[in-house]
Structures are given as structure tokens and as C-alpha cells.
Image (cartoon, helix red, strand yellow):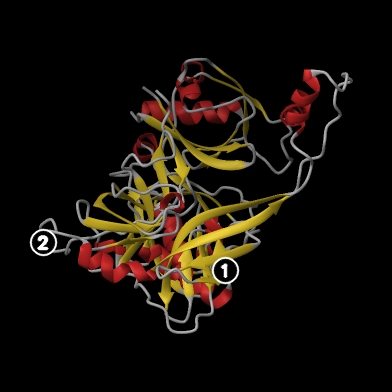
């Protein structure tokens, strides 16, 4: 059986969502809704010229040999540039000619042509595009106002709601499919702000960039990817939520690029071991593992080891919730955040800065995390050594890195289970800096004596700070 894999699919999905308060019965027909919405969905054709690869030298064979033709085939044609085209979908959001699609539909295109439901075609200009959310905004100049669609509230879409998709799969022309919302908040590792709506409305190659409608005819998603062994629909498709797309599209229209909020913090998920080590009641929140020097987070007083639980009155259930919320925050706005620091709740104010593509990646040295440490180093599988000149040279560690070197890790040990590697540097144990192997041993012994089940370490791993909860028993 072929391994299932995610494939970008030129796709369009209309999601018919039921009313938030009570479920709607299955519709007798989608015909009236489709008739109303089809004119607002378009086909997008792109073209580009690919340069021919350089020719490779052919083996010295007689010209009349059958091998001569074979080697020419391997060489790749006559060396002339190739003209390639691709197809996708999109939808009109403004009668004046603004059209939304996926970035991967128009990426690297030299020419973009939009064909409407009535068969008319117009050249399109790329107004702006955003690779992080796979969205793009096009503009055509129509002779008369165009039929336009409208964004709905994707947060109101519920699992099980009817949805409808319209697009141009395989270049066949306008196609309507229907299904339900299968899941919400899917992270498919497509980008840093994944929050996909999953649907079983059939979508295929060529549907990308098309709309996902609810039963009121509002766009609640933009179809972007499918899960498939062959590239064809198997009933698992993914759409970018309208509430995420709306703000990005507005910024593309205004600035030509997406302008995102940034606070200069690096976070990680709160694992079960980390939650135990820090004495947290649950795994809810985003653990601060590093901050940019003089960034908004550092200026606001955040510390390494803080667990952000509330941002602008919105709970951080999972760590991946935070980047999306920060990105959607207007630049310059001051927001309130709640953190848990050493078991106590604190409230801070932070002013949102603008995320730059080359935003500083330099992470400040750690301040304290929270509780615990462990028992015998040998049982944990850790062999430690001082961080001297020889160690720095061997593992290429900068002089600015301070702590205790992990020189070896025992196989099938608790340390190896947590991905400890030779060259890691233990910076802190239980929020306290360590400088010698004895420091680490003492912290762990104290945790064992106190009856703790997890010791919490701050580790510098190839230049990145990360918290590791190492189980003691």
C-alpha cells in the first residue's frame, strides 16, 4: 500500500455550515446555492518559461548505434526553453476585480489569466502574496462590476456542518462538490500558522485557491491541500479558515505583503514531564524557551521558563495557538498577557512589533524556568564534563555558552529518550545555573530527596535553548 502523504492540490471547496445554535437538516438540493455562487468562482491559468538544463557530454558511440538515440533521450531534448502552464481556482471578493487564490497557484508565474464562469478571460496582476499562509491576491480590470463572494465567520463552522466546494479540478471547468466539516484546527505542517478546516467535500488538483462555502453562501475557507496516496481525492481536504485569510488579504490589498505582529519570543510545548517538573496543573500554555535581545518580550519583563496561558484575553490551550494570535495582532498595539512564573500567576503588558522576514534570531541567555532536578546521573544515562577549551573546540561551542557539557549519553536511557546528545550543554537545573557536573548532581539529588518525579533542565542544543523534563523514576 502506498504511503499516504499530503499533496498540494489546485483546489476549491465550498463549505456549507449549519447554524451555530442548532443543526440543519440535509438539503434536498444544492442547486439554488450553486446557481447563486458559481459566477463568483474563477479559473486561474498561469504560464512560465523554464530554461533548459545544460547539456551533458555524450559518450563516444558510433552515430548509427542504437545507443546514440538512447543517450540523446537521457540528455533531454534539443536544449530549447520550455513553456509550461498550470491551472488553479480562485474567487472574486470585490466587484472591482480583486480575486483571492493560493500562493502556490501563481508562484513563479510570468503571466496570469483569469477565466470567469461566463467564459470571458482577463489578464491579472499579482497584487501581493504570502508564503506563510499560502495566500495570494490578484487584480483584474473588468468592463463592468463582477459578481463577488463574501467572507463568513469560520469560527462558527462546526464539525458536521454541511459545506460546498466550487473549483476547476483538472481543468475540466466549474465543478461543484459537497460534504461536511470533518475537523477543525488541523496542523498539517504546511506553515507556521496552520489552522486548517478539514472537509470530506471532494477536491482535487486544480481546486486549489477555490472557496469553501457554508450553507448561507459565505466563504469560510480557501481550499489548499489534500491528503492522498495518488493526488486524487480520498475525502480528506484542507482549507485555510476565512478568519485567518481575511486579515492577510486585507494587508495584501493595502501593503502588498502581510504585516504580522511579533514579540521576539521562542516557545515550546508543555510536555507532561515539563508540566510535572514545573508543578503545573495541566499542559496548557506556551513555555518561553528564549527571547530576542531587546525584543518586545524582553522589554515587557518576560523570562525564560514563564508559561504564557492568556494572550489578549484569549486562552493559550496549545503552544501553537500563540504564534497565530500574535501574528494577527496589529503592530503597535499593547496587549495583556498572563504567565505562570514559579507556580504563581502574573500579568504583563507587551507592545507588539512588526515581524520582519529577517527578524533577529539571536536568543538571549536564559533566566530561570521553574521547579525540579533528578537523581543519579549514571541511571539517567548522562555523562557530564566541564565546559573547558577542549570541549568548546571539539563541539564548536561559542565562548558565550555557559553550563555543563553532556559528553556522552547512554543508550536506552531516560536521557536518550529525551534526545540528549553529546555536545548538549546543560545551562540550568530547576531554574538555577550550573557550572560543574557536581552542580547538576547536587540539584538532581535534592530533587530525589524532595520526592520529585521530574527534574527540569534548560539545555543549549546547537545554539537553541530548550527545556527538557527528565523523569527521575
Q: Is residue 218 visible?
A: yes
**Front disc: 1 or 2:** 1
Q: Earlier in the sequence, mark 1 or mark 2?
A: 2
**Which quadrant of the rendered structure holds the C terminus?**
top left
The structure residue drawn at horizontal position 18% and vertical position 61%, both measured from the top left corner, is 18
**Distance (Cα) linking label 1 and label 2:** 39 Å
Foreground residue among 70 and 51: 70
**Which residue is under mark 2?**
22
The structure residue drawn at horizontal position 56% and vertical position 64%, both measured from the top left corner, is 129
Foreground residue among 250 and 431: 250
Q: Picture quarter containing residue 64?
A: top right
324 vs 440: above or below: below
Foreground residue among 230 and 387: 230
**Which residue is under mark 1?**
128
Mark 2 Cα-neighbour bin, 10 Å: few <14, some 14–19, many ≥20: few
The structure residue drawn at horizontal position 21% and vertical position 61%, both measured from the top left corner, is 30
Q: Picture quarter containing residue 152?
A: bottom left
Q: Residue 227, position in %: x, y?
A: 39, 40
Q: Residue 140, position in %: x, y?
A: 53, 75
The structure residue drawn at horizontal position 67% and vertical position 40%, both measured from the top left corner, is 401
Tags 1 and 2 touching, CB below 8 Å: no
Q: Is residue 387 left or right of residue 177?
A: right
264 vs 285: above or below: below
Q: Residue 51, position in %: x, y?
A: 75, 48
Amino acid at each position: 500500500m502506498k504511503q499516504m502523504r499530503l499533496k498540494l492540490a489546485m483546489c476549491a471547496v465550498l463549505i456549507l455550515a449549519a447554524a451555530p445554535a442548532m443543526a440543519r437538516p440535509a438539503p434536498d438540493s444544492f442547486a439554488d446555492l450553486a446557481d447563486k455562487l458559481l459566477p463568483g468562482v474563477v479559473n486561474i491559468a498561469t504560464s512560465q518559461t523554464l530554461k533548459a538544463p545544460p547539456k551533458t557530454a555524450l559518450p563516444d558511440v558510433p552515430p548509427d548505434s542504437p545507443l546514440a538515440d538512447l543517450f540523446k533521450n537521457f540528455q533531454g531534448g534539443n536544449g530549447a526553453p520550455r513553456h509550461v502552464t498550470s491551472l488553479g481556482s480562485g474567487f472574486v471578493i470585490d466587484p472591482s476585480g480583486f480575486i483571492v487564490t493560493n500562493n502556490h497557484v501563481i508562484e513563479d508565474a510570468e503571466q496570469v489569466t483569469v477565466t470567469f464562469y461566463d467564459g470571458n478571460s482577463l489578464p491579472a496582476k499579482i497584487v501581493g502574496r504570502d508564503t506563510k499562509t499560502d495566500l495570494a491576491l490578484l487584480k483584474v480590470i473588468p468592463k463592468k462590476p463582477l459578481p463577488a463572494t463574501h467572507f463568513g465567520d469560520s469560527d462558527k463552522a462546526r464539525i458536521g456542518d454541511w459545506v460546498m466546494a466550487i473549483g476547476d479540478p483538472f481543468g475540466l471547468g466549474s465543478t461543484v462538490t459537497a460534504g461536511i466539516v470533518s475537523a477543525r484546527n488541523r496542523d498539517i505542517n504546511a506553515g507556521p500558522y496552520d489552522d486548517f478546516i478539514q472537509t470530506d467535500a471532494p477536491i482535487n488538483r486544480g481546486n486549489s485557491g477555490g472557496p469553501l462555502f457554508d450553507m448561507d453562501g459565505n466563504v469560510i475557507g480557501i481550499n489548499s491541500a489534500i491528503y492522498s496516496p495518488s493526488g486524487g481525492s480520498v475525502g480528506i481536504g484542507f482549507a485555510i479558515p476565512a478568519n485567518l485569510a481575511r486579515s492577510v488579504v486585507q494587508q495584501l490589498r493595502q501593503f502588498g505583503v502581510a504585516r504580522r505582529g511579533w514579540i521576539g519570543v521562542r516557545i515550546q510545548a508543555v510536555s507532561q514531564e515539563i508540566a510535572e517538573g514545573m508543578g503545573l496543573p495541566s499542559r496548557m500554555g506556551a513555555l518561553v524557551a528564549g527571547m530576542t535581545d531587546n525584543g518586545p518580550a524582553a522589554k515587557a519583563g518576560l523570562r525564560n521558563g514563564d508559561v504564557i496561558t492568556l494572550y489578549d484575553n484569549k486562552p493559550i490551550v496549545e503552544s501553537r495557538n500563540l504564534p497565530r494570535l500574535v501574528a494577527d495582532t496589529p503592530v503597535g498595539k499593547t496587549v495583556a498577557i498572563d504567565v505562570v512564573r514559579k507556580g504563581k500567576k502574573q500579568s504583563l503588558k507587551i507592545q507588539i512589533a512588526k515581524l520582519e522576514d529577517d527578524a533577529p534570531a539571536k536568543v538571549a541567555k536564559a533566566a530561570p524556568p521553574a521547579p525540579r532536578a533528578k537523581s543519579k546521573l549514571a541511571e539517567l544515562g548522562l555523562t557530564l564534563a566541564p565546559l573547558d577549551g577542549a570541549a568548546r573546540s571539539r563541539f564548536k561551542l561559542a565562548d558565550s555558552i555557559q553550563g555543563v557539557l553532556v559528553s556522552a549519553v547512554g543508550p536506552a536511557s531516560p536521557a536518550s529518550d529525551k534526545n540528549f546528545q553529546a555536545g548538549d550543554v546543560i545551562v540550568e537545573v530547576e531554574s538555577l545555573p550550573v557550572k560543574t557536573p557536581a552542580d547538576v548532581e547536587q540539584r538532581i539529588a535534592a530533587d530525589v530527596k524532595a520526592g520529585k518525579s521530574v527534574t527540569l533542565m534548560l539545555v543549549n542544543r546547537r545554539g537553541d535553548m530548550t527545556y527538557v523534563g527528565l523523569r527521575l523514576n
